Image (spheres, rainbow, N blue to C red):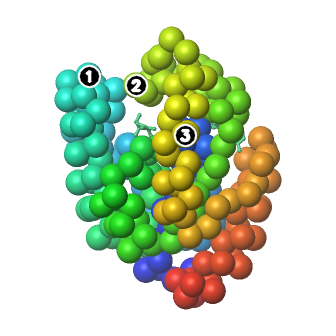
Amino acid sequence: MNPSANLFLIGPMGAGKTTLGKKLAEHYGLQFIDLDDEIERRCGVSVATVFEIEGEPGFRQRESKCLAEMCQLRGIVLATGGGSVLLPENRAMLSAHGFVLYLPVTVDQQLSRLARDRKRPLLQAPDRRERLTAMATVRTPLYEATADLRLDADSNQIIKVMETAVQQLDARWQILGQAA
Ligand SMILES: Nc1ncnc2c1ncn2[C@@H]1O[C@H](COP(=O)(O)OP(=O)(O)OP(=O)(O)O)[C@@H](O)[C@H]1O
Ligand SMILES: O=C(O)C1=C[C@@H](O)[C@@H](O)[C@H](O)C1
Ligand SMILES: [Mg+2]
């Protein structure tokens, strides 16, 4: 793999961006970075604490600044946050600096995968299904518009999703001239 290529994973909470991103980085010999972890490292507190203190607008500002810095790097697989596509400037950055892979997920899959999650602030709602559905209505068109490739691998087995991702990336990423 071309060591200067960047792969950006986008998609909703629980889509598997972090899980698959780590595996893809290892497979292609690239560096894995998780945007949420990077924000936490810089702030010295959790994403949830940033939301508590600064609200969602404060978090979005930090997220955008951190994303801009990550876009200056080369040879990375970046698992973005679920809301990273909300700001138009973020969508432009993603498109300009790497190949954007969208991992779709159904609300039912999210509910089951994140059933035990207590740390994602936007999931702390009385009705999680309603919250996730409302988020999907706003965000799905943004994921679709930003993606270079939508990963169609509707499996609950990560190993199968990984196989499909590599097949589809090997076909498409090279055509776009970013892979060796
Ligand atoms: N294809 C899959 N099938 C079954 N479980 C999965 C799959 N992908 C991820 N998971 C599980 O779902 C949970 C959430 O996955 P992960 O943290 O990778 O999602 P994410 O897209 O990074 O979410 P966030 O945007 O909140 O960071 C994890 O427990 C992970 O093991
Ligand atoms: O979907 C979202 O808006 C979020 C997803 C997480 O990755 C974090 O970035 C944060 O919890 C917000
Ligand atoms: Mg993640």
Q: Which mark is residue 137?
A: 3
Q: Residue 147's x, y, as percent?
A: 54, 64
Residue at image point 38% right, 74% down: 96
Q: In the displayed structure, does residue 95 sit left or right of residue 127? A: left
Q: Is mark 2 within 8 Å of ligand 2?
A: yes
85, above or below 56, in the image: below
Q: Amino acid at mark 1?
A: Glu
Location of ligand 1 given as a quarter of the image: top right
Other-residue count near label 2 (Cα within 10 Å), few / some / many at <14 / 14–19 / ≥20: some
* Quadrant the C terminus occupies: bottom right
Residue 45 picture quarter: top left
Other-residue count near label 3 (Cα within 10 Å), few / some / many at <14 / 14–19 / ≥20: few
Q: Earlier in the sequence, mark 3 or mark 2?
A: 2
- Alpha-carbon span between mark 3 and mark 2: 19 Å
Residue at image point 76% right, 62% down: 164
Residue 173 visible to an observer of this rendering = yes
Q: Look at the numbered discs 1 and 2 and tell me whether their residues touch, using CB distance below 8 Å.
A: yes
Q: Earlier in the sequence, mark 1 or mark 3?
A: 1
Say which element carries label 1: helix
Residue 26 picture quarter: bottom right
